[in-house]
Amino acid sequence: MPKLFKKIKEIRSFLKELKCNGSNLSVGFVPTMGYLHKGHMELIKLSKLQNEITVVSIYVNPLQFGAGEDYERYPRDLERDLAMCEEAGVDVVFAPEDQEMYPELPKVKIDIPGLTDRLEGAYRPGHFNGVAIVVLKLLHIVQPDRAYFGEKDYQQLKVVERLVKDLSLPVEIVPVPTVREEDGLACSSRNVYLSPEERQSASAIYKSFLLAQKLFQSGNTDANLLKEAIKDFLLKHPHVRKIDYVEITDEELNPVEEVKEGDRILVALYVGNTRLIDNWRLSHEKL
Amino acid sequence: MPKLFKKIKEIRSFLKELKCNGSNLSVGFVPTMGYLHKGHMELIKLSKLQNEITVVSIYVNPLQFGAGEDYERYPRDLERDLAMCEEAGVDVVFAPEDQEMYPELPKVKIDIPGLTDRLEGAYRPGHFNGVAIVVLKLLHIVQPDRAYFGEKDYQQLKVVERLVKDLSLPVEIVPVPTVREEDGLACSSRNVYLSPEERQSASAIYKSFLLAQKLFQSGNTDANLLKEAIKDFLLKHPHVRKIDYVEITDEELNPVEEVKEGDRILVALYVGNTRLIDNWRLSHEKL
């Protein structure tokens, strides 16, 4: 069983002793909101490969949810998560209560103009402020050598990379490619919200990426043309109720008009009442 | 001579080895903009008392100066500072170049609404964003157990305390009372800007605090009455050119109308062309 901590003080002193035990062990950290899936398992696998100690945090961060979002119904199952962590060989789990993380509401506001105000930030105001605060807190608590973030939440990854760079955090951020179900749907804890019919429609996101990739590979480099093709395709599917955005950007999330290898498609949409996000790196490689 | 570092990577690996040397030595950190004076020496003295290793940083942070402020003319003298650090028994000095601290301009913006937008923040827009970024960077580079801040920059101290709390930084912030010259003027690197005549007028700030303290001790608890008395007194002095603010707040910098023990007077004004700030804790103790 991984060692379970709920208190900041206790995990800190445990890790301090462990790290400073003469041998200077390296620590890999996988921050999660729990309800673990295959995507998380990839993060853990890589951390295990690259570090002597792997720490997983499980915490549904209220600060990154907006009013009317799914904070209350977000799936939680600590026992199942702990069993999966054990199976994966995780050494330490940090699963704090709200009172421990936020004894009072933080007053600090963290923005990255041009990054946190776009895409997800535009549709979920305050979301990345909540992400930035919880990630900084967790990095300050665990003080890992490496931290693992899935490319599924690509904008979040970019926000965290920028924070680490701008604030000289002593950690290496390791991005991990999105893990997908057999039909291409990106693994996400929120997929459990989908009815069987919605679940089927949700695979259209992946198919729309393949369509765009094919158009790109046959010489179409007009971002608008690709975006329209994706939208048209998506909206043909039942249960695809509303598209928040379909955007194409460079690696650093700056919008592009002419598409080149390495650019990203980013999509947010509702399937039924469930909001899903996904993204795709355009390349010339054949699938 | 203290060990001098100019590179983040080098001071980090030096301190990591030192700290993790089996014995788990504690590190005290005194961040400064150099041109050290008696106030800094008090911070260093306390750090030496409470820690096995004392690190001083010397860096004039361009990010916390506004357009038209004194960034270019801010006094610098690394050799003198190093000699003073040696005299004081400092172990490590970190004196990075701009290129090392900001290889590119940070994009992150850090605010604490209700705190960074008031007093100094209102008169120096962007100042506390620059302070927050450099302090977080330095804390991430040095990773001290304790960091020492003078009460002279009281609002800065409160900003740093709030950042540490909100972001769970693994450091204890130790406030150190303001050190004053014989005539009561708070020690500051900027005092060298003052002509002899201005220097004399500058002591009016301290005298105005004593006046307010006396009024408070004889039963006057109306903040406005105290503020007006301070302003009237200050403006009687030659070279006191412009008062940015005279404010009375509680310990956490919330404005008060009725003054009580422990409240703070905060003043910013120009003596000649030199902007000075100072503050004072009101108490019933006789001086």
Image (tube, coloured by chain):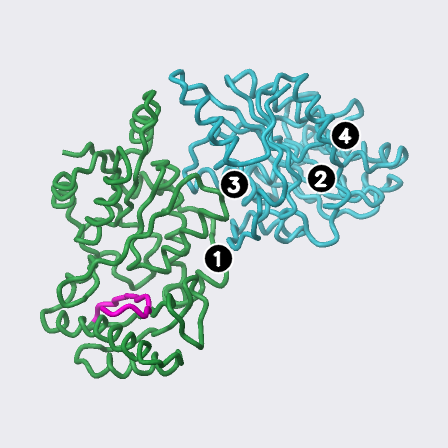
Chain colours: A green, B cyan
Amino acid type, label 1: Ile
Real-space Cα separation, disc 1 to disc 3, in angstroms: 16 Å
Query: Residue B137 — which label?
Result: 3
Q: Is residue B122 visible?
A: yes
> In x, y percent, where is residue A128?
39, 57
Q: Quadrant of the C terminus of chain A?
A: bottom left
Q: Quadrant of the N terminus of chain A?
A: top left
Write the residue at 51% across / 18% down.
Answer: B51
The secondary structure type at the circle numbered 1 is: loop
Relative depth, front residue between A276 and B128: A276
> In x, y percent, where is residue B26?
46, 21
Provide the chain ID for the residue under circle 4: B
The secondary structure type at the circle numbered 3 is: helix
Provide the chain ID for the residue under circle 3: B
What residue is disc 2 on?
A: B277
Amino acid type, label 2: Ile
Provide the chain ID for the residue under circle 2: B
Provide the chain ID for the residue under circle 1: A
Real-space Cα separation, disc 2 to disc 4, in angstroms: 10 Å
> In x, y percent, where is residue B217?
68, 28
Are marks 2 and 4 in one subunit? yes
The secondary structure type at the circle numbered 4 is: loop
Within 10 Å of disc 1 (Cα), the crowding (few <14, some 14-19, many 20+) is some
Real-space Cα separation, disc 3 to disc 2, in angstroms: 25 Å
Amino acid type, label 3: Lys
Magenta extent: A273-287
Within 10 Å of disc 3 (Cα), the crowding (few <14, some 14-19, many 20+) is many
What residue is disc 1 on?
A: A112
What residue is disc 4 on?
A: B185
Mark 1 vs 2: CB contact within 8 A: no
The secondary structure type at the circle numbered 2 is: strand
Mark 3 vs 4: CB contact within 8 A: no
